[in-house]
Image (cartoon, helix red, strand yellow):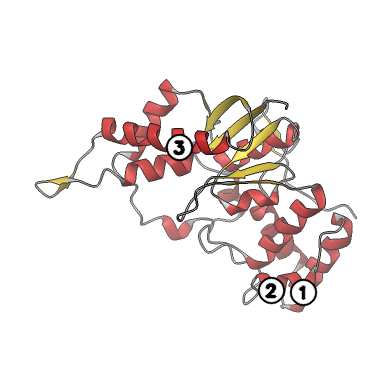
Amino acid sequence: MAKITAFIDADILLYRAASFCDDEFDGEPMRDVRQAMTMFDMLLKKWLKDVEKAVKLDDYFLVVSKGRTFRKDLYPEYKANRKDIKPHPVLFPLKDEVMELQATIWEDDMEADDLIGIRVTEDPSMRLAVSADKDFATLPCQLFTPASHGKTQGSLTSYNEDEANWNWLIQAMTGDTIDNYKGIPGVGPKKAAKVIPAPAPLDVMWPAVERAFIDAKMTKDDALTMARLARILRHGDYNFETKETKLWTPSR
């Protein structure tokens, strides 16, 4: 069996580890980075143990978000619903510690999702995305979802190009309340699946998506913006030398 390199969504682990440090002293939250780092290491080891039940790892890298994403420039309301939410006081010191001590990948002004997407779609047969985030189903890649909610074992799934594009366009139509982009108001997964009932080539699915936006009194530009927001970057979508993002544009 070929050995795989895993790219791990460390943002989730960081937030979970920080949330365990909720002790207070004299009404002020404690900033015990050592405690958070211990919890981070425990969570990471648990994920790695879970992954290695399914695949043989050659190596792994932690991937973290850093700075402002291009999506904020594309759509100012992106994640604007979080502007009043203060991060846990230990989160950023913990991230600095992890970035200094662990094999970590980051890029200024890029989300971890995009960095993982670029890496794993460059060589889907030898690279693995590891995350509890369902949005990774929008990538043509191998995805390992760690065990959660009482499950004893995670799941390994592989998505081909048509399947990933179908999941991505469904997401574009339904929007994302967590990331604060609207899609087509009133359209959930069931209604979106009536627009594109099954995975198909992108040039077949996209015109149907555009029509759905127009039928909802929106525009083709709205459809394109939602698709760009929902799309996790893939290999070729970002130039690491010029720091430029190549926004997806449909072929006509």
Quadrant of residue 113 within the rendered picture? top right
Q: Position of residue 93 (x, y in %)?
A: 33, 32
Q: Quadrant of the C terminus?
A: bottom right
User: At x 39% / y 31%, what residue is drawn?
Assistant: 41
Q: Are marks 2 and 3 in contact (CB under 8 Å)?
A: no
Outermost residue, left side? 26
Question: Considering only order in the chain, which callout, 3 or 2, is on the residue closer to the N terminus?
Answer: 3
Answer with left or right where residue 249 lies relative to residue 69: right
The nearer-to-camera label among 2 and 3 is: 3
* Amino acid residing under circle 1: Lys
* Amino acid residing under circle 3: Lys
The nearer-to-camera label among 3 and 1 is: 3
Q: Which residue is mark 2?
A: 190
Q: Nearer the viewer, residue 124 or 67?
A: 124
Question: Considering only order in the chain, which callout, 1 or 3, is on the residue closer to the N terminus?
Answer: 3
User: At x 36% / y 57%, what residue is drawn?
Assistant: 84
In this view, 84 is above or below 184: above
Q: What label sits on residue 194 in the rendered view?
A: 1
User: At x 51% / y 33%, what residue is drawn?
Assistant: 48
Q: Position of residue 180 (x, y in %)?
A: 53, 61
Answer with left or right where residue 148 lies relative to residue 210: left
Q: Which residue is mark 3?
A: 46
Task: Work out how far the residue at label 1 is from the one at label 2, CA to CA, in angstroms.
Answer: 7 Å
Classify mark 2: helix, strand or loop: helix
* Amino acid residing under circle 2: Lys
Task: Work out how far the residue at label 3 is from the one at label 1, CA to CA, in angstroms.
Answer: 39 Å
Q: Are marks 1 and 2 in contact (CB under 8 Å)?
A: yes
Classify mark 3: helix, strand or loop: helix
